[in-house]
Image (spheres, rainbow, N blue to C red):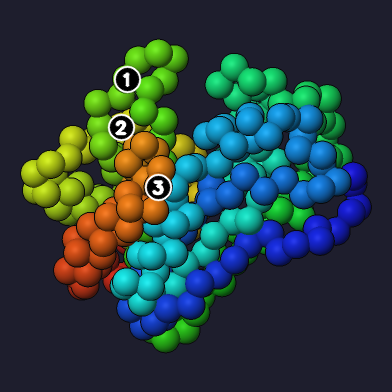
Amino acid sequence: MSGSKPAAPVFETLDGNVASGVILVCDHATNIVPPEYADLGLSKDQLSRHIAYDIGVDGVIRHLSQLMNVPAVLSKFSRLLIDPNRGRDDPTLVMRISDGAIVPGNAAIDQDEIDHRMRTYYEPYDAAVGEAIERCLELGIVPALISIHSFTPSWRGTPRPWHAGVLWDSDARLALPFLEALRQQGDLVVGDNEPYSGELRGDMMNRHGTQRGIAHALLEIRQDLIADEAGIREWAQRLADILPPLVAEENLHSMLEDAG
Ligand SMILES: [Zn+2]
């Protein structure tokens, strides 16, 4: 497989008003596995599970991009191929086993193939996010980044109590007001760095947000809430109501000096 060029685009950008200073990012939008990888040896059932992508987020991003008229960047390959939301040397960059499922197409992967996937999928998508940021900077606007993911309602048999979670690391400028606004909706249990911590060195928000001093937040939505079109539209509208006053705050649109 090394050396082969992808037949289909590995990322997609959605148009929006660049001057809005907001960029939506969707690392796990799809479960697409290029044909030469033969579904990585997984059944269609396994590929339709959360292990291959974040259920519901593609639709939320598309509606939200339209409602707010802001640009978005979406990956067009499964996280099982290579996970763009991991650091380059993260051991879970290419998953051999995920939530109990062995991934046959990754089991015997060598460094050449990892490098190939890095060059062919991870890096072009990562560069597309960087280019979206550059387009804002060219207008003299430091953008804020909003990344959207989704999580399973339970993990290893234990139900998760949250409807959503805001993940962040050291830059609270967007994350904490966003968290507070979600909690003020009144009908949501919202995790603060739950169900995961946002402090993951080398992940997408670390690379383009924390390390550059660019304001950002990562939203995790529980998958069953965005499993159908009605839920997707409801969440997109909810976010389109909440976010505009938050992202209009002046303090988001400058680079933090002490970027980690
Ligand atoms: Zn995700």
Q: Which residue is mark 1?
A: 159
Q: Nearer the viewer, mark 1 or mark 3?
A: 3
Q: Which residue is mark 3?
A: 228
Dot 2 alpha-carbon crowd within 10 angstroms: few under 14, some 14 to 19, many 20 or more: some
Q: Position of residue 69 (x, y in %)?
A: 36, 77
Q: Which residue is mark 2?
A: 194
N-terminal of the pair, mark 1 or mark 3, is 1
Q: Position of residue 44 (x, y in %)?
A: 68, 34
In the rendered structure, the answer to whether residue 185 lies left or right of residue 169 reads: left
* Residue at image location 85% in from the left, 58% down from the top: 5
In the rendered image, the vertical position of residue 248 relative to residue 107, given as above or below: below
In the rendered structure, the answer to whether residue 172 lies left or right of residue 73 reads: left
- Asked whether the viewer can see residue 47, the reply is yes
Viewer-proximal residue among 5 and 138: 5
- Residues at marks 2 and 3, CA–CA distance in whole angstroms: 23 Å
N-terminal of the pair, mark 1 or mark 2, is 1
Helix, strand or loop for disc 1 = strand
Q: Position of residue 124 (x, y in %)?
A: 68, 61
Viewer-proximal residue among 165 and 175: 165
- Label placed on residue 101: none
In the rendered image, the vertical position of residue 22 relative to residue 28, given as above or below: below
